[in-house]
Image (cartoon, rainbow, N blue to C red):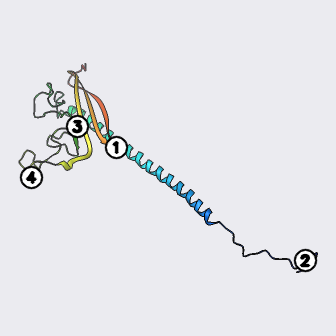
Amino acid sequence: MLNKKSGRIPSRKNTNSESGVTILEMVVAMLVLTVGLLGLAASIGYAVNVSNKGRNITNTKLLVVSCLEQMETLRNTQQLTFAQIANVGDPGLGTGNFAGFPTGFQPVSINPGPDGIFGTADDLINAGPDNIYGTVDDFTDYTWAIAGLQRQIVITSLSTNLKRIEVTVRYPDPDGHLRDLVGVSYLNNDATTNFL
């Protein structure tokens, strides 16, 4: 069709021209995305680390509370007398087969040992092939120790009818540091009505 004013055929636009993004724009876009993804990866790593810290603290709290509750159960069931709930060497320990709870940090065991009480020196003793404690085939089984965990039980007599029980569990932090979690409870002598 002719252009009425000039009498020429109008020229068509060049359809062969290249359009889109340049390689430089693509490189810049990839750099921006890479920085964003690295930031996301760092935040995920931080979240996992915090989650592991929370899990370690929760598990450690459960160990402390179970040890403190065990003391109450030992007294309530009369498996140990009030006098026997003491550290090794305590002058008020009393008589009997129970030697007391060792002082210092001990490995935390999944087995209570022959005395049936967690936190004592015999927790890692395995009955051996005959499955009877006190025979010659008994041995110390270190696989029963929970890796990285240690427990200390300190029992202080405040009066003849009241004891302070402090349980400290040492556990590894995901950062590689050792942390201590301390729980304190007071145990009274249920045989008397006067607790002071």
Q: Is residue 125 left or right of residue 152?
A: left
Residue at image x 59%, y 60%? 29
Within 10 Å of the Cα at label 4, are there few (<14), some (14-19), or many (20+) other Cα atoms?
few
- Residue type, mark 3 in image: Phe
Q: Nearer the viewer, mark 3 or mark 2?
A: 2
Within 10 Å of the Cα at label 3, are there few (<14), some (14-19), or many (20+) other Cα atoms?
some
- Residue type, mark 1 in image: Asp
In this figure, which residue is indicated by the disc labeled 4?
130
Of marks 1 and 3, which one's residue comes earlier in the chain? 3
* Residue 185 x, y percent position in the rendering: 29, 29
In this figure, which residue is indicated by the disc labeled 1?
173
Query: Dividing the picture into quarters, in which one does residue 108 lie?
Result: top left
Outermost residue to the left: 136
Q: CA distance from mark 1 to mark 2?
A: 84 Å
Q: CA distance from mark 1 to mark 4?
A: 39 Å
Q: Nearer the viewer, mark 1 or mark 2?
A: 2
Q: CA distance from mark 3 to mark 2?
A: 101 Å
Q: CA distance from mark 4 to mark 2?
A: 112 Å
Q: CA distance from mark 3 to mark 4?
A: 30 Å
Mark 1 lies on a secondary structure that is loop
- Residue type, mark 4 in image: Asp
Q: Nearer the viewer, mark 3 or mark 4?
A: 3
Of marks 4 and 2, which one's residue comes earlier in the chain? 2
